Image (cartoon, grey):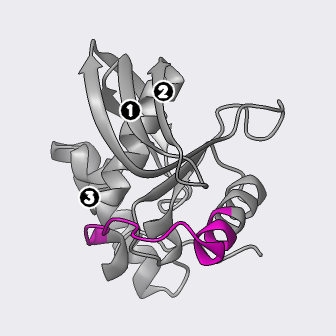
Amino acid sequence: MIRPILRYGERQLHARATAVAAFDDTLRRLIDDMVETMYAAPGVGLAATQIGVPLRVIVIDTSVGKSTGELITLVNPEFVERDGMQLEEEGCLSVPGFNATVLRPSRAVIKGFDREGVPVTIEGKGLLARAFQHEMDHLEGMLFVDRLRGIKRDLIVRKVQKLQRSGKW
């Protein structure tokens, strides 16, 4: 089922997610909904917090569904290593229509569990490393806009506020 994606400014997006305690049918249904929602958007990744579920679950597919076997599902993910630096433009399904250049690691190793509770460790470079950090930020209640400083951040926030006031957000 495709679920509505929360938008920047909604309180639930800015709260820290809690750990998943049970690997059950409810979790698997959540993951299936997240994958369907991410592909429908379309997006590279989605955190459970973006659909209003305060659990530490992320899904990522850098091919955006165009290549089989690219889908990554991580439950209770944690960083093992991060290094390097990349400065690229990114956007977010919760901040539609806005992009900005954000500093991210060029390499990241992340560990967690798959949908069945099996431990996994995955290394990501380039876009995948960026996606890991982006989605992990969501689990901490942070969006890419929160990583911006100065005029760029102010410009996006003001435009979002204007859209909110006009009922178009």
Above or below — where is 108 with respect to 132? above
Residue 63 rendering spot, x and y as whole percentages:
73, 31
Question: What span is in magenta?
Answer: 14-31
**Frontmost residue, 149 versus 129:** 129
Residue 142 rendering spot, x and y as whole percentages:
28, 57
Query: Which label sits on residue 122?
Result: 2
Asked if the residue at tag 3 contacts the one at tag 1, i.e. Cβ–Cβ closer than 8 Å, the answer is no
Left/right of residue 84 with respect to residue 163 in the rendered view: left
Considering only order in the chain, which callout, 3 or 2, is on the residue closer to the N terminus? 2
Give the residue displayed 27% in from the left and 12% down from the top.
84
Residue 16 shown in magenta = yes
Give the residue displayed 43% in from the left and 30% down from the top.
130
Query: Which label sits on residue 110?
Result: 1
Query: Which label sits on residue 92?
Result: none
Q: Marks 2 and 3, how far apart in space? A: 20 Å
- Residue 17 appearing in the image: yes
| Element assignment for label 1 | strand
Query: Which residue reaches farthest left?
Result: 150
Crowding around mark 1 (Cα neighbors within 10 Å: few <14, some 14 to 19, many 20+) is many
Give the residue displayed 67% in from the left and 76% down from the top.
3
Crowding around mark 2 (Cα neighbors within 10 Å: few <14, some 14 to 19, many 20+) is some
Residue 19 rendering spot, x and y as whole percentages:
33, 65
Q: Mark 1 against mark 3, which lies toward the viewer?
A: 1
Which image quarter: residue 79? top left
Asked if the residue at tag 2 contacts the one at tag 1, i.e. Cβ–Cβ closer than 8 Å, the answer is yes
Query: Which label sits on residue 140?
Result: 3
